[in-house]
Image (cartoon, rainbow, N blue to C red):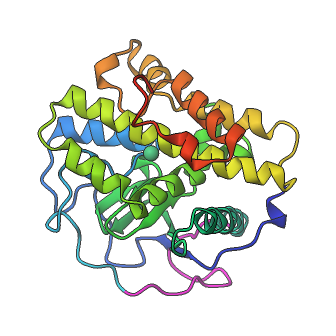
Amino acid sequence: MRWGDMRRSENVEDRGGMSGGGGRMPLGGGMKIGGGTLVLLVILGLVFGVNPLQVLGMAGPDVGAPAPAPSMPAPSSSGSGAPAPSDTRKDFSARVIGDTEDVWGALFKAMGSDRYPPTTLTLYRGAVRSGCGNATAAAGPFYCPADSRVYLDTSFFDELSRRFGAPGDFAQAYVIAHEVGHHVQNITGTMQKFDRQSQGLNERQRNALSIRLELQADCYAGVWGYFAQKRNLLEPGDLEEGLRAAAAVGDDTIMKRTQGYVVPDAMNHGTSEQRMRWFKTGLASGDPRACDTFSVAQP
Ligand SMILES: [Zn+2]
């Protein structure tokens, strides 16, 4: 991917590590969650969820940590304290976010909508305080609707390559674009609709609805990819990298690897086949309207 040609966004906050602040922050600090939920949270997070607490219907004004201190600009040189994401990764992430801003900004305009309000990408190491509660790197990248931010521990890029077998810059860009897809769902009201519809559903039904939300975010990631390709920002092998990543984070693939078998009712992000298919749908059309995963009988 020719990411060096993408515009660098200003909407990136580098929080570095937490140890420079108020000491270590355990997962769930301030939140009472049981062991079963914890496992579920981690699994949800690993496959780049929207904020897992939101999906579980647990998010509310009470679960959040105190508001984070006003953000400081990232130090330009290596300062004291916890290590910050490497400059290359930060630059990469800022440019991918910048490119999603350009693409979604143009799409919003073309669809006659208001200005596209950008998300802020929050880079961290280890643990982070979000508007949706505390999280550790184990949760994986996530989007928090309450503060409209994407949270990313850049060590996840290593995970993607080593544990998920999906290396490459376009695989990493897909992850970011998927989270931006959740942001689009938030500002267009889809996420609010999802929350309303989730009320009163049993777990199986809620998972089925969650899959539609996740597949739409995959499709939106593909829409971004369509325009990256159209502007010659992709290189040979990039699309394969993205598809490999979409397959690697399919529920069935993860379940098979982690527990040796698949529980269809427990899926909440979609199978590898579904995730690749919807990513491709976005890639082929470049049209967000092609991403209506909620209307089709079988997503
Ligand atoms: Zn997601």
Of residue 111 and residue 293, the one placed in the foreground of this image is 111
Q: Image quarter for residue 105? A: bottom right
In the picture as drawn, the residue positioned furthest to the front comes out as 112
In the rendered structure, which segment of residues is drawn in magenta? 70-86
| Residue under the image location 66 percent in, 66 percent down | 106
Q: Is-magenta flag for residue 115? A: no
Tell me: residue 67, above or below residue 49. below
Horizontal arrangement in the rendering, residue 93 relative to residue 13 (left or right): right
Estimate the x, y position of residue 91 in percent, counting from the top left.
Answer: 71, 68
| Residue under the image location 51 percent in, 53 percent down | 181
Horizontal arrangement in the rendering, residue 217 relative to residue 95 (left or right): left
Q: Quadrant of the C terminus?
A: top left
Tell me: residue 202, above or below residue 14. above
Tell me: residue 236, above or below residue 84. above
Quadrant of the displayed image that contains ligand 1: top left
Q: Is-magenta flag for residue 79? A: yes
| Residue under the image location 45 percent in, 36 percent down | 293
What number of labels is visible?
0
Of residue 289 and residue 183, the one placed in the foreground of this image is 289
